[in-house]
Amino acid sequence: MTVLSTYRLQFHRDFTFADAERIVPYLAALGISHVYAAPITVAQPGSTHGYDVVDPTRVNPELGGEDGLRRFVAALRRHGLGLVVDIVPNHMGVAGHANAWWQDVLANGPDSAYARFFDIDWREKLLLPFLGEPLPDALANGALELKRDEGGLAVWAYDTHRFAVRPDDPGGPLEDVLARQHWRLAWWRSGNDRLNWRRFFTITELAGLRAEDPDVFEATHALYFRLHAEGLIDGLRIDHVDGLTDPIGYCRRLRERLPDAYIVIEKILAPDEPLDDAWRVDGTSGYDFMAEVAALLHEPAGAEPLGRHLAAISGRPADFPEEEFEARRDMLSWEFEGQLLSCVVAFAELAVEEELTAGMLRRAIERLLWVFPVYRTYGPDAPAGDEAIREVARARALPLAAPGERGVIERMLEWLAGRGPGDPALRAEAVRRFQQLSAPIAAKAVEDTAFYRYGHLLSRNDVGFDPGRFAMAADEFHRRMERRAADWPRAMLATATHDHKRGEDVRARLAVLSEISEEWIAATRRWDALMPAAEAGVEPGDAYMLWQTLVGAWPAPLDGFEERVAAWQEKALREAKLRSSWAEPDGGYEGAARAYLSRILSNEPLVSDLSGFVARLRPAGEANGLVQAFLRCTAPGVPDLYQGCEFEDLSLVDPDNRRPVDYEARQRALGGEERSFDARKQRLIADLLQLRRAQPNLFVEGGWEQVPADGPRAGHVLAFVRRRDGMSFEGAAAIRCARAIIACGGSVPAAEWWGETRILFPSGARRAAEVFANAPVCWRS
């Protein structure tokens, strides 16, 4: 089945295949062609997301098992729908006791049949930093127990973590048993510096898999191959593809096994980073489109005053590259020492005849990682884009070189290009170590640190975004859509995901602030005067991000809102790692910030002012939300609808964006006459998705052509036509019209504001005032 649109569902034990089966008729009526499922294999017991896979060979019984999956797929097929599944080839969950492969490795060490499945350096014992305290303290406190269970003799920690003992171990006093194992237990804080196996980012509970090994590839993918062969699944979404040793080679092998499957990859692309067709996939999972359409909604002129205000109140950098640079240095220093040392050792072995010391190599690696422009490179056989990436890295890193060590950076870049002196096998291993370090450094430094420090405008801080690029001109957006139509017509198009920092309609509303920056700044000053952050012991920069979050997610009524924002606030403070952190939470500061939030929401004059400000913004934000949904459903690619986001999405970062969805309300609204924003957004999406199903060739294969506009407001029109085989679709959206919408108090700009602006459609010119008389989007097919 051709994938025309997808609907993402988060499966877990509280939302199973049986639960999803009940909403299939609704999804069909909405116009969806395929459900796009979160990971369905066995995960850690009680997992709410499925990415902590412990057995990739079976369908998770908590979801209904394979029988439940088959019943669900049968229901999908009866309604003409298919299934795309998210898979996790890069890592497995190893905490607790549920991963039989990992337990076998613990028991048998390097002789285990699964030892090579994981990326472990066996030159020393396998370090297991799962203790909540140093080992002597854990022993003294009775946190460890030696006992025999159904799997044999094992050491249990805190009655939750199981560590299998060697099968030939005679047992006896606990300390003697520990000394004889293939592994050694350690305090969790030591993991960052001493870990001798690859993990997922900084999550020690997730161990990296060696998918490049043919046996590992077959073992971890056999279930998907069988399900596809039996016609149960139509495609795969590959999680964190850049974590693999050879992402391009992996995707090519996958395509060879699944030549007709729909395959997309979770790939974070830098703003100008191309995705080469050498990957042999259908495209990315859509973060790049989310970044493009979000940037289109922002007014470029808002960047300077907002940046100036941020710097003035917080003392933080006004420009994102400075914030990113500091975060990269922090992450490399604080959380990746073990992986960095492994990388240094690998290059030192390669450079043994070069007389380049480990210290020189370490400094060169550090400087490259501080400024690396993309997640990673892909080696000498990769697309030509790698050379351009290395040139940018060279230009940024050389000025940072230690005195006399510019040549070391040059040599590093030569090795990364697959050239230079030394044994080719050692070079390949060293380059692999660098590539598998640069990706997590980028992710943790940018998305999970700098995004929580940089409060310029939070609608520009999300997965795959570059806050350094505040806005996108309409002409540039058109160029990118033309390239999508030509190169990636089946890539996924997302505007909300299970990973987003804030919901699509939160971002759409916050984008309005870019058009009214001075009014926004004045409002925050007014609110701070009513509730001074300094007097509450809260940093002004943290308060400024809180104001944005309150305005962006402000609901009606406020039931449960304070608890949701408090959860976001705690995560934001800890991810920023400035006043608190996950490693060492500062209860005093977090308590002050929590109290500050409570005082804000209990201050009636302030709440009234906030609520009134949001009410003025709301119509313009809703217009942006409709434009965003319209472009996702009409642009070249496969629109993905994240669960529940056919209604207004005012969610915050996970777990808030994974809350249960009220499908009964959505089913009642579909086809009704309600005029709420929820109903209008749902109706727009349904109309366009049903049109896509009726004319698949037009939307799958049709090009994208910019349609010009003329007149006084031509810059506020984004119009296009898509054509294929005599069919056409003409569409137009009103962009950056917030001031006009606020001024007239309606949902679209007043007719007189448009004046004589015309849209020069191929079918005939039309006045913008007529096109946008009732909605910020319009189309004809």
Image: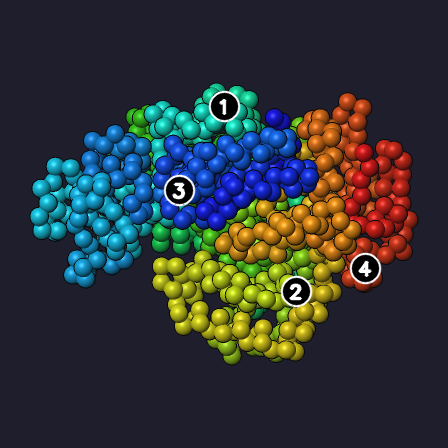
Q: Secondary structure at mark 2?
A: loop
- Residue at image x 54%, y 54%? 659
Instruction: Name the spot of residue 493 as percent of width and height, x first.
Output: 62, 39
- Residue at image x 42%, y 29%? 223
| 260 relative to 556 in the view: left or right | left
Given the image, on which type of amino acid does mark 2 rest?
A: Ala
Q: Secondary structure at mark 4?
A: loop
Q: Spatial distance from mark 1 to mark 4, Cα to Cα?
A: 53 Å
Q: Spatial distance from mark 4 to mark 3, Cα to Cα?
A: 49 Å
Q: Spatial distance from mark 4 to mark 2, Cα to Cα?
A: 19 Å
Which residue is denoted by mark 4 in the rendering?
746
Relative to 561, residue 7 above or below: above
Given the image, on which type of amino acid does mark 1 rest?
A: Glu
Given the image, on which type of amino acid does mark 4 rest?
A: Gly
Instruction: Name the spot of residue 578 as percent of width and height, x first.
Output: 43, 63
Instruction: Name the spot of residue 287 as percent of width and height, x first.
Output: 57, 42
Looking at the image, tell me whether mark 1 or mark 4 is earlier in sequence order.
1
Quarter of the figure with the N terminus: top right
Q: Spatial distance from mark 3 to mark 2, Cα to Cα?
A: 37 Å
Q: Spatial distance from mark 3 to mark 1, Cα to Cα?
A: 23 Å
- Residue at image x 25%, y 56%? 158
Which residue is denoted by mark 2 in the rendering?
556
Relative to 625, residue 521 above or below: below
